[in-house]
Image: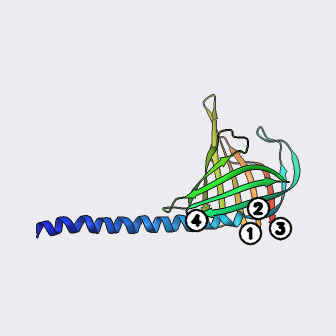
């Protein structure tokens, strides 16, 4: 009887562990599927403000996100006004709505990794820099008002509490 229990417990633990991993992979795949909403051509309007990290300007651009999914990976080649800018590869956690994005430049320079959190219709890309012992936090916040419309803003903070807008904009999916 002791031998049967000793064999049965590892089998049960393996089954529970496999089921948990499978559930997390399913959630990760569902989160990656949501990011496919970025695929397609977008008309982008941006207004930037004068800050220590941005200059005042207005821009209108066409953004093409050429995206494809393979398993738990989603890749989007971003092309701005016909000029390829970056390949972004997304992977997501099955435990929460956090994803990692890997930005791969077309010129062969080192790729960079970033985070993205999805909270309903609000998708946030945070990062920070530290110079001379001073940390500045940045974020881009995309708010989906519909499957074809995104309001976005880019902000910075020196205390991670109060945020100063650097730019605001609107993206509308074309066709």
Neighbourhood count class around disc 1 (C-alpha, 10 Å): few under 14, some 14–19, many 20 upward: few
Q: Which mark is residue 121?
A: none
Q: How many marks?
A: 4
Left/right placement of residue 4 relative to residue 73 reads left
Left/right placement of residue 21 relative to residue 40 reads left
Considering the numbered disc 1 on the image, is that residue within a helix, a strand or a loop? strand
Q: Which mark is residue 145?
A: 1
Q: Is tag 2's residue or tag 3's residue first in the polypeptide sequence? A: 2
Considering the numbered disc 4 on the image, is that residue within a helix, a strand or a loop? helix
Q: Residue at x 78, y 50 (%)?
A: 84
Q: CA distance from mark 3 to mark 1?
A: 15 Å
Neighbourhood count class around disc 4 (C-alpha, 10 Å): few under 14, some 14–19, many 20 upward: many
Q: CA distance from mark 2 to mark 1?
A: 7 Å
Q: Is tag 4's residue or tag 2's residue first in the polypeptide sequence? A: 4
Q: Is tag 4's residue or tag 3's residue first in the polypeptide sequence? A: 4
Using the rendered view, name the quadrant where residue 112 is placed.
Answer: top right
Q: Which residue is mark 3?
A: 174
Considering the numbered disc 3 on the image, is that residue within a helix, a strand or a loop? loop
Residue 31 locus on image (x, y percent): 58, 65
Instruction: Nearest to the eye among marks 3 and 1: give it.
Output: 3
Residue 1 drawn above or below residue 131: below
Q: Which residue is mark 4?
A: 31
Considering the numbered disc 2 on the image, is that residue within a helix, a strand or a loop? strand
Residue nearest the viewer, comparing 43 with 57: 43
Q: Which mark is residue 151?
A: 2
Which quadrant of the figure contains the N terminus?
A: bottom left
Which quadrant of the figure contains the C terminus?
A: bottom right
Residue nearest the viewer, comparing 71 with 129: 71
Using the rendered view, name the quadrant where residue 54 is placed.
Answer: top right
Residue nearest the viewer, comparing 4 with 138: 4
- Of all residues, the one furthest to the top in this rendering is 132
């Amino acid at each position: 009887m002791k031998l049967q229990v000793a064999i049965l417990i590892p089998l049960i633990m393996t089954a529970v562990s496999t089921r948990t991993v499978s559930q997390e992979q399913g959630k990760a795949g569902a989160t990656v599927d949501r990011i496919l909403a970025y695929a397609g051509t977008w008309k982008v309007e941006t207004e930037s403000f004068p800050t220590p990290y941005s200059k005042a300007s207005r821009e209108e651009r066409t953004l093409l996100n050429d995206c494809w999914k393979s398993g738990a990976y989603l890749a989007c080649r971003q092309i701005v006004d016909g000029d390829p800018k970056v390949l972004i590869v997304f992977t997501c956690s099955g435990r929460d709505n956090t994803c990692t994005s890997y930005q791969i430049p077309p010129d062969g320079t080192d790729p960079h990794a970033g985070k993205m959190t999805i909270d309903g219709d609000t998708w946030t890309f945070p990062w920070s820099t530290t110079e001379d012992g001073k940390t500045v936090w940045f974020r881009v916040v995309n708010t989906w008002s519909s499957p074809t419309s995104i309001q976005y803003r880019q902000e910075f903070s020196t205390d991670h509490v109060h945020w100063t807008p650097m730019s605001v904009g609107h993206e509308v999916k074309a066709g």
